[in-house]
Image (tube, helix red, strand yellow):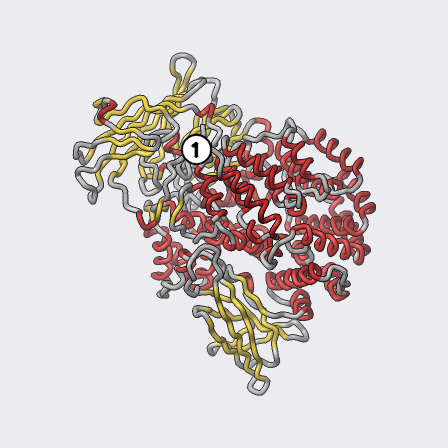
Amino acid sequence: MINRIENKTKYLKDYKPSEFIVDNIYLTIDLHEDSALVTNVMTIARAKSASKSASLTLDGNSQELIKVAIDDKLLRKDQYELTDYNLTIPTNEKDKFSVTVVSKIIPQKNTSLTGLYQAEDIFLTQCEPNGFSKITYFLDRPDVMTVYTTTLIADKKYQVLLSNGDRIDYGELPQNRWFATWKDHSKKPSYLFAAVIGNLKAREDVFITKSVKKVDLRIYTPEADFDKTEYAMESLKESMKWDEDVFEREYDLNTYMIVSTPKFNMGAMENKGLNIFNTKYIIADKNTASDQNYIDVHDVIGHEYFHNWTGNRITLRNWFQISLKEGLTVFREHEFSSDKFGRGTKRINDANTIRSVQFQENAGALSHPVRPESYIAMDNFYTTTVYEKGAEIIKMLKTIVGNKIFDRGMQLYFSRHDGEAVTTEDFVKVMEDASGLDFTQFKLWYSQAGTPNVDATDSYNEKDKTYTLSLKQYCPLARHTQNKPFYIPIKMALINGKTGGDLSSFYQNKKDDEHIIYLSNAEQNFIFTDVAEKPIPSLLRDFSAPVKLSYNYNDDQLLLLLAHDSNEFNRWDAGQKYFTNLILKLTKEPNQKIPDNLFSSIKLLLNNDKLDKTFISYAISIPSETNLYSLIKDIDPNIIFKVKEYLTKTIGKELQSNFLTIYQKLNDSLKLKEYSLSKDDVAARSLKNLSLKYISAGDEKLGEELAQKQLENANNITDRLAALFVLINSNNDALYESTVVSFYNKWKIEELVIDKWFALQASSTRPNTVMTVKNLLKHSAFDIKTPKRVYSLLGAFSRNYDQFHKIDGSGYNLFMELIIEIDKINPSVAARLTKIFENYKRFEPKRKSMMQEILLKIKNQQNLSDDTNELVSKILE
């Protein structure tokens, strides 16, 4: 059963409110061994603005219609119209009426993982964006909100029957069956409906809200995973308290449930009161979850909980507004994570995601505004543009209005729009009302695609101590008309060129060490007075806007900023710029000597006990390929790989004693402790394991010896994976083979560890990795129907730029075959894999030609899904 929707482009300009309102829905899902019978009884009212003659058209597909009735009167087949995507019923000009629809679905054969489907021995739903129409016929759109009463019926062998809201009834039925009825008193759209049927064990706890209401908390997993849910429960309670403390939002139901499953297309889903999670974002202990996995569990649980207000109680008028819920909730998630794990390094992580992923999306054929203007398959718009850039827009608003006014605006948003389906304009309007500012120009961030480029030049008048910063913005676009100027907040400071300290200055009659300037024109000058000496500008502090800002720093200036800038983000960014410039030079002159001042700067960072060790790890890490590719024409991935490899080896050799000292010191101190997620311990492991990587690059034999000892003695998966990375990249075939086999045999019962085992092998720089991936596809532990396993193997391989982009095209051909195969099983996953080719036109001619041929072969497949076809067509345009 494939999730195929009507191949018709939807446009924002065509949006019209629904002509009908659904007051209540009474839904019964009667599950049997080979199918499910779904009975849907709706009470419906005609909207005041609707035509009296309008018929009721319900969305529905992938089901067998059994019967339809209006006001309990059964309709003949000639009294309604049925297509592959809709059921149209004449209403005889009635203003109020009931509709009963009975249909049959087969969740046991539903491999798309949308609608109601079977995952191992449980049945569950995924309805966002249009999965509810695969369960029953309904007005499956986010602005139709109704009260759900759901009855689930199944064999008694299934001990858990869950749906949204609170359970109001349950009992036994004949033939060894039973039922449970749930009611969600709050109105919600169909995409937030959820149901789960199966055998699961619940970790139970209680949260007492600010108003002293008791909320029952339950996290359901297979019994084997029960002991690994303690951290998830702690994170849930932290989320609930944080949202009360920071946003004054209290939970509204009596029960909050989470269900974990390995077969899920997304990370998690915020269904009202019954979240469904990918296992990787729930299960966590030191043997299965790395430090980053723990952080991800904490953040994703927070994200889905925060949706209760930003997404559920206040929802979307239409799917074009998706960033209204996702961008705002990602912003809230980032704030939550920053408060827990550190604001500076979190900001570096978030900005790096924007630069390495979202900027690439903006630069390619799939570029789209944060608020899309059109779509064919809505599944294709769960993108970093919608999520991460959407969050950056919220962050800019907070920067512009200030913390207090932003908080006032959020409270106004909650009070004004609770229970409504709204738009991004509605959100911006509350910020205008709270601040008294006009955000007409700022709203272009939602409607215009592309990444603004800001070029900076400057001059200093020594006589009158005046510094002038000149900024010019432009937005190169791949597929869109020329943009109007954006409204761009730029946080900045002036730095003493000798000491690296902040220079105070006057800007608009205000003296400070740091200023926020606002670029609103295509070109603009900013004048600072009382500047004691010629400064170095520290621009775009904290990545205050998602733009590419360029200033012609020389290497000495960058190293000074790396050593002394008081802003942690800009300090890191200076180092990344230095590395980037060096790599670009090496691509043109491969044999030139690495400057000694780079080694000196790294030594200073390693020996600075005042710096956070996670920050040091970030600061001395070489930029990713995706960040480098954006600066190169006719990309040759093998050249970039060789240059990065040369730079890493050289740093490792030159600073071997320094890295070895750091490694041994941190390793010895961590040995004395139990594993913990304290900020200091996470930072220590980060720097220790990066040191191991550099040691191994500079001296492979020494690195392998240290890695083997670490793998043998480690008490956590973070250290095991770091050691495994070194050994899996070894040129020693016997060591590689023995490591891979022994690690699998030891951890094969731990599903999440084996995901990592697949990913590390696919990431290996060994020359035969394409063949390794082919063999892993045949491994007994690989399941092409489980998205997280597919992403572990194929996602990791697609980011292995040297091997995936082999000049013989073997990586491309392997991906083509798998995309075609997976498209028949799960179009959403196939479409996501297709995105690896979105920037193919920027590669050197031979690879560009090969990728184009691959895309044409995919496009010409018969019965290609709308999801994959839409993306391939756009990429080829």
Q: Quadrant of residue 747?
A: top right
Residue on which the image places disc 1: 3
Q: Residue at x 26, y 29 (%)?
A: 81
Let me know if residue 709 appears in the view: no
The reply, left or right, for residue 218 in relation to residue 164 is right
Residue 558 percent coordinates (x, y): 66, 67
Let me know if residue 866 appears in the view: yes
Query: In the rendered structure, which amino acid carries the disc numbered 1?
Result: Asn
Q: Residue furthest top?
A: 175
* 609 w.r.t. 525: above or below: above
* 542 w.r.t. 756: above or below: below
Q: Residue furthest bottom?
A: 463
Residue 577 percent coordinates (x, y): 63, 62
Q: Residue at x 42, y 45 (%)?
A: 250
* 251 w.r.t. 822: above or below: below
Q: Quadrant of the N terminus?
A: top left
